[in-house]
Image (cartoon, helix red, strand yellow):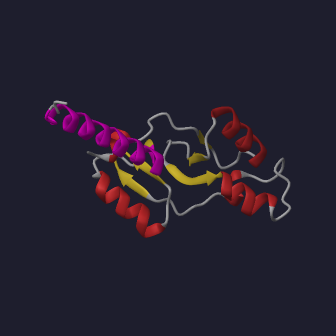
Amino acid sequence: MSAGKICSRVVVFATGNETVRDAAHRMRENNVGALVVVDKERRPVGILTDRDIVMRSVAEDRDPAYTTIEEIMTRELRTVQESTAIEEALRVMQRFGARRLVVLTDEGKLAGLLSVDDVIELLAEEAAAIRGLLRKEAPAVAV
């Protein structure tokens, strides 16, 4: 299975010149913990997480109404291609301690966002399928 098959294709994104306050509102409205920051060609240039807002804005007494996303976003994106196997994506997450990976098209544009939650959901579905198979094949016990 590939990262492109299970990633979230509906990605909430922002541009670097937007304010942190606007970003926080968008996160709340969409119930997400991260915004992918894109350029004019919709190529990812960073990610803004709720943790970035807390650690680089609130904790540093920056006014979110005047601080831009670009000032506090994480610039070092962890990315994978749509065709990257889930196993490899997990290795990337583990290597960098990342809970989210930006998924890119072959052209380098934003395709989706893969989170640890997406992988856990896949594993849960596979475990349920195996459980169903085992139940189906279990011999009937006569009492």
Residue 135 in sight here = yes
Q: Is residue 143 left or right of residue 54?
A: left
Magenta range: 113-139
Number of marks drawn: 0
* Residue at point 53%, 63% (across, down): 76
- Front residue (pair 63, 16): 63
* Residue 135 in the image, given as x and y percentages of width and height: 22, 34
Q: Relative to residue 95, is residue 83 depicted above or below?
A: above
Instruction: Judge whether 56 appears above or below 114 on screen.
Output: below
Q: Is residue 21 left or right of residue 95?
A: right
* 112 within the magenta span: no
Q: How far from the left and from the top, in percent, is residue 98?
A: 49, 61
Q: Quadrant of residue 29?
A: top right
- Front residue of 67/93: it is 93
Which residue is pictured at 26% across the width and 45% down the height? Answer: 1
Residue sitting at 35 percent across and 56 percent down? 89
Residue 32, percent across and down?
61, 41
Assign the magenta stretch its main secondary structure: helix
Residue 124 covered by magenta stretch = yes
The C terminus - image quarter = top left
- Residue 127: image location, x then y, percent: 30, 43
Q: Residue furthest front?
A: 143
Indicate whether 63 appears above or below 27.
below
Q: Is residue 109 visible?
A: no
